[in-house]
Amino acid sequence: MTDLEEVLQNKMPSAAWVIDVEHSTVPMLNPAAERLLVGSLGQIQAGQRQIPLALKQKWQSRLSHSQKDQRFSCRWPFSSDPSQSYQCVGSTVQLADGRNGILLEVSSNAITQTPSSVPEKDMGLLRQFKTLSFAIFSLDGQFINASDFFLNHFGEVKHINYLFAVSSAAKSFMARVNGQSSLSQEIMLSTANGVRWHRIEASFDAELGQIYLLAHDIQEERDHEVALYRLNNYDSLTNLPNRNLLYQQLESALQNAKKRERQFGLMYLDLDGFKVVNDNFGHRVGDELIQRVAERIKSSIPAGACLYRLGGDEFVVVLENTNALSELEDIAQSIMQNASNTYPVAKMDMMISASIGIASYPQHADDVDNLLKNADAAMYRAKSTGHNLYFVYENQMADNINAHLTLGGGLRKAIENEEFELHYQPKVALPDENVVGAEALIRWNHPELGMVSPDKFIPLAEESGLILPLGEWVIRRACRQLQEWREQGYPALCLSVNLSSRQFMQADLVDMVQTILEETGVDPAYLELELTESMLMTDAKQSIEKLHSFRELGLTLSIDDFGTGYSSLSYLKKFPIQTLKIDRSFIHDIGIDGDNDAIVKATIAMAKSLNLKVIAEGVEHRSQVNALGGYDCQEVQGYLYSKPLPSADFVQFMQKQVGHESFSLVETGTL
């Protein structure tokens, strides 16, 4: 059900319907309108009520002269009796396909066949107005008489002052009605059911000294105005103001800042990896996570700041009257700090962070559009650098956005044109330092930009969903490479491939890998899949099942970047893995930082007790090798031995390591 249907069906008890003017139809109406209009619409055609041509022409004219959300009074004639019509209130609304339509709502339950003015000296008015809230008061406000409808609606009213919710409003009304023959206004009156909005029409009979009052209850109309306002200006999921109100505040903040020579700023937030949550857990879980995130962000910002949701996983925080950029940076740090706590969603503890871009007036832009654009550019810098980071806008960031879009647009074409290639970084066994395997790492040889680093295009592939075909290409290419080396007589090596979190959640991943193994004829024992702790812990039960399926195929499994994720030892022993890969952040200061030494030593000891092999990545110095060897680390990988190499260079590296002619380089088209 759309938001418009929700308002129509659940928040409009009076008769209301939507007119699709272009197609001469009434595509939506609520039950009250269904009963009211039973004889007033044409035949049902293709499931939609048809409106007469004359009405279509009338509404076309009305729509062409109406602004968005503009309200207007009108009448809806009944085909069963041309002399009858209902007083309605209309407003322009946006239909599902983006076109404008008209929302009509009956503003009174009475047929508007009453006189437009009150006849003088005729107490028979009570009979004529028996279905309306009509009453007669003396010049000093004393009650004289009223229709039954009035008495049922307002209860006992001894004086006209009793009607008004605010006493000063009663005095103002009496002063005005005594000074003119008639008046009309919208005001809040006290009824038997509480204070409600009314449209009152009053006239003064000077000869009899009487005031005639006709009151129309428009509370529902006002409620619907509020509902429509919220529909157009607030996000239905989080109840946060949306893009419309953001632009209003920014324009107001800009004018105030210029007038008072003040500063103001904003932060553009985009959640990291939210698409993976939607793709793997469904939009219902994603929506609940968005709600929890909105609550967390709102609690992290000061009272003077305003939070907006632009849609999807994008938010904006606006802070007016700032004295320095540091105020915005403090808010960003508070948001990031709170993101480290898990979110209870759908009986799971989920973690998600945000990339934040900051821009301020007048340092970074002097108009609203450029201020938003530059904050967005700073956010993209944060996202491309890592997760849970913020950046303040700098001039060159706009160029980076263009490069980001250019790379994103070329990814699919690059996959089709096979512009990617794999490089291989050797894995070395200790203590003899023989090469026993390699890690396959993807590179993009862009026809115009040259070699593009994975940290620039992998996030784009994740965002666009192209990580799935790209990941499949990597696995297939790695298997073909293994088979080519085997056919050329090279020694057997174990080749590892990294899986992304989104790729790991792919429903048919196991079947896809099995198909590739069968196509290429590769022995599964020589293909290793590297997975991260956070990837496995997103849904541990499903991960265990999938890992066992991989083991049944004969693959080797490794946990990459060990120590940087969840590090759940209780689950570690349940995962059917063979290798732990210690993250480079622990290796960098090994032998210098006692804490890192303790962590590495404990990790190796724990792995040994679980019969797991340990490999350390990021090894760049001989001292690191000596320390790792002393802790019984089985394998190492890093620039000390070699950077990732193209296939031909890797074979040459192996040839030097092996040192015998049987491992000579064979000239082939692939190598």
Image (tube, grey):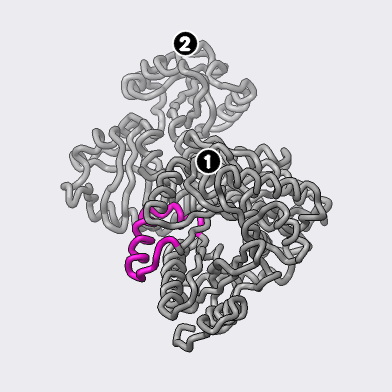
Residue 671 location (% of width, % of height): 49, 83
Give the number of the disc on residue 573. Answer: 1
Please say if 499 is above or below 643. Answer: above
Identify the residue at horizontal 58%, vertical 43% (top origin): 351
Dominant secondary structure of the magenta stretch?
Answer: helix
Residue 649 location (% of width, % of height): 58, 81
State the residue in front, 159 or 344: 344
Range of residues picked out in magenta: 499-525
Can residue 369 be seen here? The reply is no
Please say if 346 is above or below 436. Answer: above
**Picture quadrant of residue 224:** top left
Can residue 430 be seen here? The reply is yes
Numbered disc 1: secondary structure: loop
State the residue in front, 574 or 172: 574
- Residue, disc 2: 156
Q: Which image quadrant: the N terminus?
A: top left
Residue type (three-letter) at the residue carrying disc 1: Lys
Nearer the observer: mark 1 or 2; the answer is: 1
State the residue in front, 329 or 566: 566
Identify the residue at horizontal 33%, vertical 63% (top origin): 515
